[in-house]
Amino acid sequence: MMAAGVAAPARVRKGPHSSRRGSIAFPALRLACVRAAGIGGWVAGFAGAPARVRIRGLLEPARFDRIPGAPARCVRAAGIGGWVAGFAGAPAHVRRPAGSKLAVMMKLLVDRRPPAIAAVALGAVLAACGGGSGAGGDEPGGISPQVMADALRTVIESDRTVYARHVVNRLQDEEQVIEASEHWQDDRALPLPAQMFRMGAELAAEQTDLFRYALLSKWPVNAQNAPKTEMEAAGLDAVAADPSQPFYGTETLGGVDYFTAVYPDVAVAEACVNCHNAHPDSARDDFEVGDTMGGVVIRIPVG
Amino acid sequence: MHSTFFRLVWLLATVGLAGGLAFTLASPGADRRVFQPGPLTDGHHQIEIACGRCHTPFGGVRQEACLDCHAAELEAALDSHAASIFDDPRNAADLNRIDVRACITCHTEHRPEITAAMGVTLPADFCAPCHESVAEDRPTHRGLSIDTCASAGCHNYHDNRALYEDFLVEQGDSGPETFAGVMPPRGTWVSWEAAEPTPLTAADADAPAAAAGDRALIDAWAGSAHAAAGVACADCHRPAGAAWTDDPALSACAACHELEPEGFLAGRHGMRLAAGLDALSPAHARLPMRQDAQPLVLGCGTCHDAHAVDVRRAAVDGCLTCHDDEHSAAYADSPHARAWARERSGAGPPGSGVSCASCHLPREPRRVAGGEGVVVEHNQNANLRPNEKMIRGVCLRCHSLRLSIDALADPALIRRNFAGRPARHVESIDMARSRRE
């Protein structure tokens, strides 16, 4: 607003825009209208914030689906827009020549500002109402997404196998020193292999958004680990049918394009099947060692 | 003429208003509540004039602002809905409906007209987007309304340490409803400067003559744990060689007592100090407080008499000096108070009494300096809301899980300070057990 005011003189000096003045048919009536609109806009703008609260109260949703986040922002922006319009509108009636410096200033402001200010206000409303848009992923320079996914999988799978065989299976099932438990903090026990996996994936995600990985299954213990996207469902089906071949595809999630790879997750130890078959939440109780129990899904954002 | 006058008035008013608001906004010490779009929740109104604790200069709220104060407790609660769980593109569709990674999705401030318990500003069926079909997997949940998940005593959104299924099954019917348990013995963790403190007597009091007028104070101190630990007047009243003060600041206590002030500053009682404001006073409170307590301000000395160091005063009398709500007023006639009286009179064993502090500032086993110790949790909020937070650390010491869950889900019983029996039975333990049969 200030910037507009400061910029005005230089532009207007090129030639005042006074042509529209002739179109005023009923100066007195119009004067009153514009003045009223100006004061109204100012009041509305000033009252914008509290009004928002009242209006949102009215819009209070009965169901989750109708949270009025955007309308509230619109009302707030409209309030501010109204105030700005009031600033522009109130002096707009002064379209008659006047001698005072203030009047010249106002005239300069008025002659060109209202459309511009209206546009700015409208823009602000639209910007406030719109959501943010998703950002594209970076190009993984030089290495193809598939090679990168395969490499990541090698590391993930090796660590997972070592933890399952040489930590959980050895300490829990063979030497019976300590158990693995879902509530490992409470029970002072080992985290489950799946929890180990998830903790690693979450820690990695805090540090980079170059890739994401997750452990899923068509027969999950945790329902949140069931396939959620079409690509996940197709990939888990494919690696269950033929564990010798990884599954590759692309998908768009939250406005971002991903290269998505799915690899089989195989029951490498007795511990895997014993625990899953006995778990009250498990969707299957007939896993055998060597079975594909689920899949590792690796996603790499691509341009 | 007329229009020039109008223009002038309008311009002056706008400039004046904008200038006034801008000045208020820019001066850090100013009362900026005029910018508040609505009152804050009970958990934040104490620091309402510290806008910058939460807001960026342009009015947004940083997620880190929430986490600065709440991250530690969420981690301790093994947050069932930690943001990291959902921060995966596979959840994009769900997050588009409800972005549970941002605290303010569910906890919007300044919105009293839609704020429910726990500062939740979503409609009560907020579990629906992800858990609407729960009854398909769990027949026990058939016919239950989705807006009661988190309000019936069965589940919490963040803290389910005492409510998760395996815990319910394991603890479900262990032992009688009430048994003769005791609280762990109190521990005090102080950092000693000297390895072997030399006990002091009244003759060692090193207060300047002007301040040492009160003989009774000196005598009380001489019999206190402070004198026994070699802590003389100047150690607290003239910390680090500064000028003598009659009211030592929290930092004077914190010089030796490290852990307790940490909790105090994290809770309601100390959060104003932690935010760089002056100390909380009962006059700031929304809860009913005693009229004669209004001038008090909260520091260590409000509850603890540093000269007598009688910690029992802090455990009940300290609280009741200010608190005057129904629950506090009902304490005197409660079974817990009777147990406290028995312990104080020597009729009950140490730790068998139940003071205000037993539940609200409880003694907790903690790993301190490499060993296992007991620390008094001075953050009153660590065990307060949702009240199931209390179950494991407090209630289960003397009561069954079944009774604890039922009692904490009965607001009328809580107002009576647990005089009587729960009016309703929460079926969560039965449901959990039925799935295992």
Image: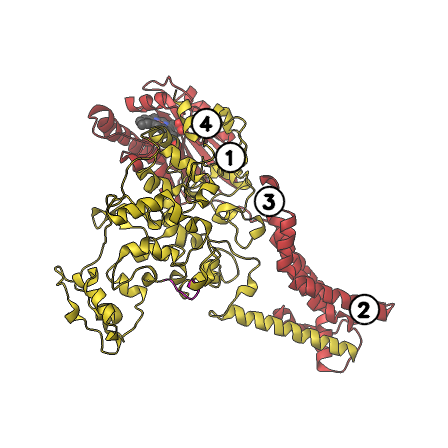
Chain colours: A red, B yellow
Residue indicated by mark 3: A67
Question: Which numbered dot is residue B230?
Answer: none
Rendered image quadrant of residue B388: top left
The amino acid on which the numbered mark 2 sits, given as a three-letter code, is Ala
Mark 1 on the same chain as mark 4: no
Mark 4 on the same chain as mark 2: yes
Mark 2 on the same chain as mark 1: no
Residue indicated by mark 1: B130
Q: Is residue A85 visible?
A: no
The amino acid on which the numbered mark 4 sits, given as a three-letter code, is Gly
Element type where label 1 sits in the image: helix
The amino acid on which the numbered mark 1 sits, given as a three-letter code, is Cys
**Which span is picked out in magenta?**
B293-298
Mark 2 on the same chain as mark 3: yes
Task: Give the farthest residue toward the right.
Answer: A25
Q: Alpha carbon of mark 4 to alpha carbon of mark 2: how far? A: 70 Å
The amino acid on which the numbered mark 3 sits, given as a three-letter code, is Ile
Q: Name the N-terminal-most of marks 2 and 3.
A: 2
Specify whether A303 is left or right of B11: left
